[in-house]
């Protein structure tokens, strides 16, 4: 019986600790509860609802919007970019400068030996330019494939659907975390303002009671 009573007391203390930590005690009616205590409790409750419901909703909406945009861009890239055969002509004398490749192609391409290659565009036009070698060491006459647009200009690999979804998921997660951080920041600012007002009222009450402190009949 004593062990059961002790366990019950521990559970009560644990529940009381959680109850106090969550701020729900501020809703309890007691003579010491101030109006700002109740307001702070409602602010905490609203912040909790926003973090648990609004922030995930914001992240979901943002992720879906970005995913739709990226998927459309991926489809357009797959329709506008082609993998065409190219032939190594000779090693390039200097690093490629002023090539027709877009920046995304240069970022995605590994650091390889620059070569002069020739290729035929999907529209039938012939092109020659400096591109990174597909294999090391490059040999004249080697064949490889490069990404170009319809006119034969070098472009980057088109975005695939899985990469688009991964980027959208990261954006959604970042949006949810950002929304939650914003809610918590607002809550902290409100609580700080409430604390400032409480200190001001306490100072005023202390200043009003100060002259009578310790006098007979002053309630001390």
Image: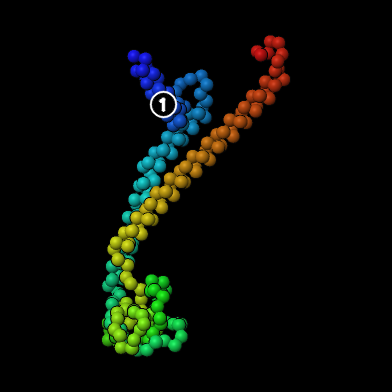
Task: Check the image and name the residue furthest to the top.
Answer: 217
> How many labels were placed on the picture?
1
**Could you tell me which residue is drawn at 42 percent across and 35 percent down?**
45
What residue is drawn where x is 37% and y is 49%?
58
To which quarter of the image does residue 18 belong?
top left
**Height in image: 83 above or below 59?**
below
Residue 205, above or below 181: above
Residue at figure coordinates x 48%, y 31% from the top left: 39
Label 1, residues with CA under 10 Å away: few <14, some 14-19, many ≥20: few
Q: Is residue 118 visible?
A: no
Quarter occupied by the N terminus: top left
Q: Nearer the viewer, residue 144 or 7?
A: 7
Q: Give coordinates of residue 218: x percent, y percent.
A: 68, 13
Q: Position of residue 198 (x, y in %)?
A: 58, 30
Q: Nearer the viewer, residue 55 or 144?
A: 144
Residue 163 visible within the image: yes
Residue position for label 1: 14
**Residue 14 location, x and y as percent?**
41, 26
């Amino acid at each position: 019986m004593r062990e059961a009573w002790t366990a019950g007391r521990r559970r009560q203390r644990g529940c009381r600790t959680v109850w106090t930590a969550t701020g729900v005690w501020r809703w309890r009616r007691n003579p010491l509860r101030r109006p700002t205590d109740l307001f702070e409790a409602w602010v905490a409750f609203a912040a909790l609802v926003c973090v648990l419901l609004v922030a995930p909703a914001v992240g979901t909406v943002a992720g879906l919007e970005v995913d739709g945009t990226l998927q459309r861009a991926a489809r357009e890239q797959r329709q506008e970019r082609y993998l065409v055969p190219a032939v190594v002509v000779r090693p390039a004398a200097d690093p490629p400068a002023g090539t027709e490749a877009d920046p995304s192609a240069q970022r995605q391409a590994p650091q390889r030996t620059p070569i002069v290659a020739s290729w035929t565009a999907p529209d039938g036009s012939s092109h020659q330019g400096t591109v990174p070698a597909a294999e090391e060491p490059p040999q004249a006459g080697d064949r490889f494939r490069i990404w170009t647009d319809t006119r034969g200009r070098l472009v980057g690999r088109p975005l695939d659907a899985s990469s688009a979804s991964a980027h959208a998921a990261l954006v959604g997660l970042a949006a949810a975390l950002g929304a939650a951080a914003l809610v918590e920041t607002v809550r902290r600012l409100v609580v700080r303002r409430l604390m400032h007002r409480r200190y001001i009222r306490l100072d005023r009450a202390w200043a009003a009671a100060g002259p009578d402190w310790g006098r007979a009949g002053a309630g001390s």
